Amino acid sequence: MARNPVKDQVAIVGIGCTGFSRHDTRTPLALGLEAATKAIRDAGLTAKDIDGIVALGEPGAPGPHQFASALGVDTITHWTRPAPVVMFSLVDAVNAIYAGSADTVLVVSAMIRLPWNSRSAANDPFRRSVPSSMAAIPESVAMATGYTAWASRYLYEYGVTREAWARIAVNGRTNSLRNPLAAIDKPLTLDDYYEARMIRDPLCMLDMDLPADGADAFVLTSAERAKSLPHTPVLVHATATGMVGENTEDQLVSLQRHGQHVVVEQLKAKGDFWIDEVDVFYPYDGFTIITTGWIENTGYCAPGKAGEFLREHWVEDENRVMIDGKVPINTHGGGLSEGATRGTGHIREAVTQLRGEAGERQVDGARTALVTPGGFFFNSQGALLRSAD
Amino acid sequence: MTDTLSDADLVARLAHLPVDRDTAEHYRGYLRHELVLNRCADCGRWHQPMRPMCPSCWSWNVVPTPVSGRGTVHLFIALHQGPPADGVDYSQGPHPVVTVELEEQPALRFTSTIVDCALDDIHIGMPVELAWIERSGAPYPVFRPAGLTDGEGR
């Protein structure tokens, strides 16, 4: 039995984003402060209203105490530095508000290109010394290579081609062209995907999210207090994080049972709506194999059928996916084309859509969102969000 | 002989590998050409990676035990770029990485590279066996297609 006493009790009331860039030279602190001040102002609040700070624990990113002093807040009663991928931070903020640890919480995340994933960052004297989190030996199936290895298994078990991943990459790029926050603005075709450089076969350059500099921030408070703030509150309807015990990348028992399945079970049990009533869908795309996993495991199609599904719901003249002609996927471009954000971009765009403020990207009448950040192993997560209107 | 190698000497000899107290016996096995994984002496289950307690029954009576090294390719990557290592030259072509499901137990796996096999011939489901190469002056366990005649591999 999945309990959900916090259902609709906490709202996202402020968002702030720097936009994403492959040319920025600012520090994570500078980026985070820009996003944080924008989010607090967006919520119609000031520094003195913030009594909780949750700072995503991205390597090299400032901690909550640094944000507290740099923002000139008065008193903080709850602060944490959760592991990356956004929901660990949002879940913590929601729980803190519901439990009374804080009333109004700032969640902030700053990402920068690092020497090991960006040549330009490797040439930046201020970034050269940031340590690498990459595997020390080639014969390792961990992090990036973990997804690549299971991508090989996906192709093998279902006897499919890379078509689904190609469509995910192109869909993201097409959507990013209408997103002024995106780091990249060059259109992409399916042929471009197949010609892209292989990095770790079977995944190529365009299967991996785009290293970029930028920050996102969110302000959350109780649904009750949210009623007096300027924007339409976006209610946190249900959240989930999930993993299975055997989650070591090369020891995961199978593609048929991992963190994504746990998250989906939780969200379905906790929420009052599911995919038939979801208006906008934000599956994570740190690697395209993660996205196809979410599409299948949330139930849009059967396991192994993402390629077929995306082809069937592809809108040729728009060069993107519209499920049943009405539900787009990753309207902001996702991490693949807006820029790698550990999922903050997916959440921010869902909030923007549910507020009806997405400009030319706006999905008419969007009132419910399914956001599924994270991968398979130890950061699978999800959220059902809805407009308070 | 190698069993008496001090911890300090083991770490020095295998400086290119992430040796710690939980994994030391695994790496010590390299020096005598044995692929050693932890097996629980109480419930008999193998587990990977090396951990000091059995995840199945919580016994601490885990014993580093050699495996046959025979198994089947379960996952396969061709690295077009990656971390540097002695004898790995990405400019000469992609470096294969295989995760092999070992015959000792379902879903018990070990990851390494594969030798004596053209890249195009590597595929998920292929039977493989253990072989040894030299890397950074020490033995390193790899796989090769099962049933080759030469006993020691390349």
Image (cartoon, rainbow, N blue to C red):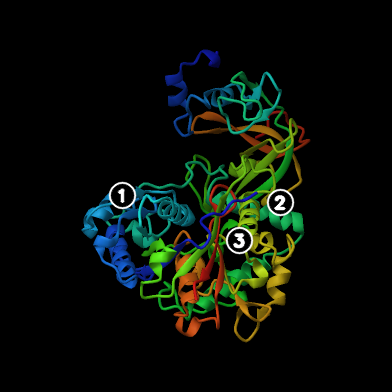
Question: The residue under label 3 is which amino acid type?
Answer: Gly
Determine the CA span between mark 2 and mark 1.
42 Å
Secondary structure of residue under mark 2: loop
Q: Are marks 2 and 1 in contact (CB under 8 Å)?
A: no
* Secondary structure under the numbered disc 1 in the rendered image: loop
Q: Position of residue A334 (x, y in %)?
A: 51, 68
Q: CA distance from mark 1 to mark 3?
A: 30 Å
Q: Which residue is mark 1?
A: A77
**Nearer the viewer's eye, disc 2 or disc 3?**
3
Residue A323: name its quadrant. Answer: bottom right
**Marks 2 & 3 on one chain:** yes
In the image, residue A116 above or below residue B35: below
For badge 1, the amino acid type reads Thr
Q: Is residue B57 visible?
A: yes
Toward the front, the furthest residue is A224
Question: Which residue has dot 2 on it?
Answer: A256
The numbered dot on residue A372 is none
Residue wearing tag 3: A271
- Is A153 on the left or on the right of A54, as rendered? right
